[in-house]
Image (tube, helix red, strand yellow):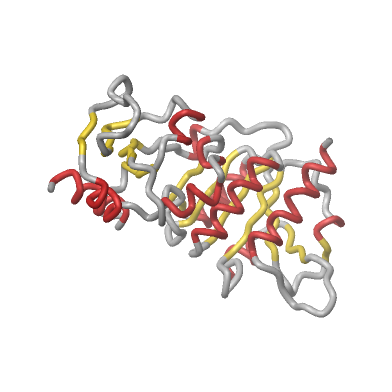
Amino acid sequence: MKVAKQIRDIKMGKIKDKFVIEGVRWLEEYPDIEIDLFVANEKSPNLERRAPVVVLGDRQIKALSDTVTPQGVIAVCKKVTYKLDDMEMKTPAFILMIDQISDPGNMGTILRSAVAFGVDFVLASKNCVDVYNSKVIRSTAGAIFKLPVIEDVDLPQAQTFLKKRDVKTIATSPHARDYYYDIDLNQSICLVVGNEARGVSLALVQNCDYNVKIPMVNMESLNVSVACGIIMQEVLRKRL
C-alpha cells in the first residue's frame, strides 16, 4: 500500500522533509504541527478536521508502529526547517552544538534538557541521528517541538559564524585543564558536545575558545547526555 510504504520510507530516512508521530498526545499538546495525513483504525477519534484520514486495520497499523501497544493513530507530519542565518541571537546567547551523537535516547535526553535549561537553538552535525526519529521524539517528551534544531550543519563553518558574532565556543573534553564552572558562562556561549565513543571531533576542540571538564571520582567519563545536562544546568544557574 502506498501510504504504508511512505511511512516506512520516512522512518528509514528516505524521505527527509517528513516525520511520523504515533498517538494523539503530541498533536493535542502542539496544535501547530503541520499534518499531511493520518493513518488510523476505525475506533480512532475524529481527525479529519486537521488532515485527511486513511483507515487501516489494527494489524496493519501495528506493523507500521514502533511501540509495543499502538494507539491506533499514526500522523505523517511536515518538518520545520531552520537556517543559521535566520536564528535570533539573544544577549547573552546560549547555543548547543551536537557533534555526531548517534543514540536516539541520548539525543532525546539532550534536547529535553536543552529546553529545560534555556538553550536558544541547537546545531546538529551531518552524522547525527535524525532529531525527528520516532525514538528521539519520545525521549524528548515533546521538547523537539519547543526548540529550533538546525540539522546537517557543517560545524567548523558554524564555529566561524559564531566567532564573528562574539559567541564563545566551549568543548567538553576529559583532557581539558579548566572545569566548566571556571568559565564565564554569562557571556554568549555555544556548548559543544560529541559522539558517545569518540567525543568532540579534534578539529572542533582545537578551534574552540575553551575546553572544559567535569570533576569526578572513580570514573573517567560520563554519558554524554548526563555531562551535557550538568553543564547546561550550571549555565542556567549562573544566569538566574
Question: Against 198, is 10 above or below?
Answer: above
* Farthest residue, direction left: 1
Instruction: Please provide percent x and percent y for residue 34.
Output: 36, 29
Instruction: Please provide percent x and percent y for residue 237.
Output: 83, 43
In the image, 236 versus 192, the foreground residue is: 236
Instruction: Please provide percent x and percent y for residue 86.
Output: 49, 32
Question: Against 161, is 224 above or below?
Answer: below
Q: Quadrant of residue 90?
A: top right
Q: Residue at x 27, y 32 (%)?
A: 36
**Can residue 152 be seen?**
no
Q: Residue at x 13, y 46 (%)?
A: 2
In the image, 25 versus 106, the foreground residue is: 25
Question: Against 120, is 206 above or below?
Answer: below
Q: Residue at x 64, y 41 (%)?
A: 115
**Can residue 93 be seen?**
yes
Q: Quadrant of residue 187?
A: top right
* Farthest residue, direction top: 49
The count of marks equals: 0
Instruction: Give the left or right position of residue 147, taking residue 10 as reference.
Output: right
Instruction: Give the left or right position of residue 96, taking residue 45 as reference.
Output: right
Instruction: Please provide percent x and percent y for residue 109.
Output: 60, 53
Q: Quadrant of the C terminus?
A: top right
In the image, 88 versus 62, the foreground residue is: 62
